[in-house]
Image (tube, rainbow, N blue to C red):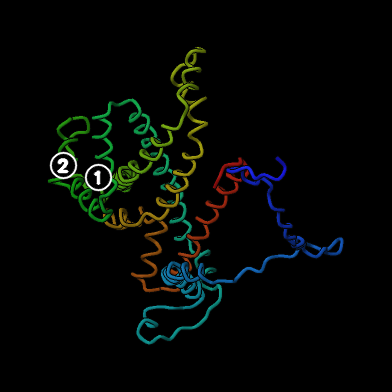
Amino acid sequence: MPGDTVLGRQDTTSAPAPAPVPVTVPAPVTAPKSAPGTPPPRRRRRRTHAHWWLLSPAGLVIVTVTLAPIGFLLFTSFTDYDQRSLFTGEYATVGTEQYAELLADPAFWRSLARTVWFTAAMVAGSVAVGTGVAQLLTRLGTALRMTVTVVLICAWAMPTVASSLVWKWLFQPGYGVVNWLLTATGLFGDLTGTDWANDPALAYTSIWLLVVWQAVPFIALTLYAALLQVPAEVQEAARIDGAGELRVWWSVTLPFLRPTLLLVTLMSVIWDFNVFNQIWLISGGGPDDATTTLGVFTYKTAFVGFRIGQGAALSVITTAILVGVTALYVRRLLRSGEDL
């Protein structure tokens, strides 16, 4: 009935929803447009000197042990610094007089000529033997290769003074082991009383053998590491095409080996050009200055004759020659496109 109330019935009419609250979205902030043609603004970087502080210890060491001595050497080469100057500190600036006197001295040119040809002989022997040993290491088994490597490292680690003294004892007349072995073969007659240091040819031979023995380990191990980088498939392809082992090495292996070979050759030139300990301890530059190379001549001039200014000029000339050789090598690398 219209007036009756139905029990248990609920009013399903919902209340009106509240009105939505308007949300204001802020407009995006845009950077001011710059005028056309102007470069974009750069961020300001905070300047710091941390890298200079980190490099300063090494820089101080380089300045102390390298740049300062070189500067003093250059300065001394233009003075008449001698034994008197060591005690009194007095010296005079003579300009290029030391250099002019050296260039007019026949003894300087003779020592330079000896140095050049002896360096060429030592470098050729060291590189040839070192290349052969490196190639041999690629053919040996693991155990034998490790044995040869340890022997090479031990020979390389031997101090030059100690090895030179032992080498001189090996070639001594009367009780030298080398003379005894050569005499025992009977090929050269009785060499028991032969003094290698008193014969120019024999003195050069013994010094050459010593320098080559000391240089071969570094060259052999360096070239062996380079040989391991040669692609084996390229060598195998050359063999399949009918190339012999010599042709494979010359046409395939050598091009890969050339940059490392040039590097060890340059380093050998620098080391052998400055050889002093071996020559001085074995022959002392004799007999009759026959083995006096540029290094021995410089030592005699500066510390035996106490013409220190002239000795400094000799050192500058030697350094200039080696810098020229190094510049030729770097120029060749740049032309060939190799990395320095």
Give the quarter of the image for residue 44: bottom right
Q: CA distance from mark 1 to mark 2?
A: 21 Å
Q: Quadrant of residue 152?
A: top left
Question: Which residue is at the front of the view, 61 or 289?
Answer: 61
Q: Give the image location of residue 51, x and y in percent.
A: 51, 67
Picture coordinates of residue 140, whole percent (x, y): 30, 26
Give the mark toward the camera: 1 or 2: 1
- Of 71 and 43, nearer the camera is 43
Q: How many marks?
A: 2
Q: Mark number for residue 177?
A: 2
Height in image: 231 above or below 154?
above
- Identify the residue at the far right of this view: 36
Q: Secondary structure at mark 1?
A: helix
Q: Of the numbered discs in the image, which one, if any, rests on residue 191?
A: none
* Rendering coords of residue 204 (x, y %): 33, 46
Asked whether 278 or 192 is in front, the reply is 278
Q: Identity of the amino acid at label 1?
A: Cys
What is the residue that sits farthest to the left in this orientation?
175
Q: Residue at x 47, y 67 (%)?
A: 55
Mark 1 / mark 2, whichever is N-terminal: 1
Check disc 2 and report its element: helix, strand or loop.
helix
Estimate the x, y position of residue 251 in percent, counting from the top left.
52, 25
The mark found on residue 154 in the picture is 1
Along the horizontal axis of the image, is 235 left or right of 290?
right
Q: Residue at 28% across / 53% down in the picture? A: 160
Drawn side of residue 168 relative to residue 321, left or right: left
Q: Would residue 25 be visible to someone looking at this image? A: no
Q: Amino acid under label 2? A: Val
Q: Residue at horizontal 28%, vertical 43%?
A: 153
Around disc 1, counting alpha carbons within 10 Å, would you say few (fewer than 14), some (14 to 19), or many (20 or more)?
A: few
- The N terminus: image quadrant: top right
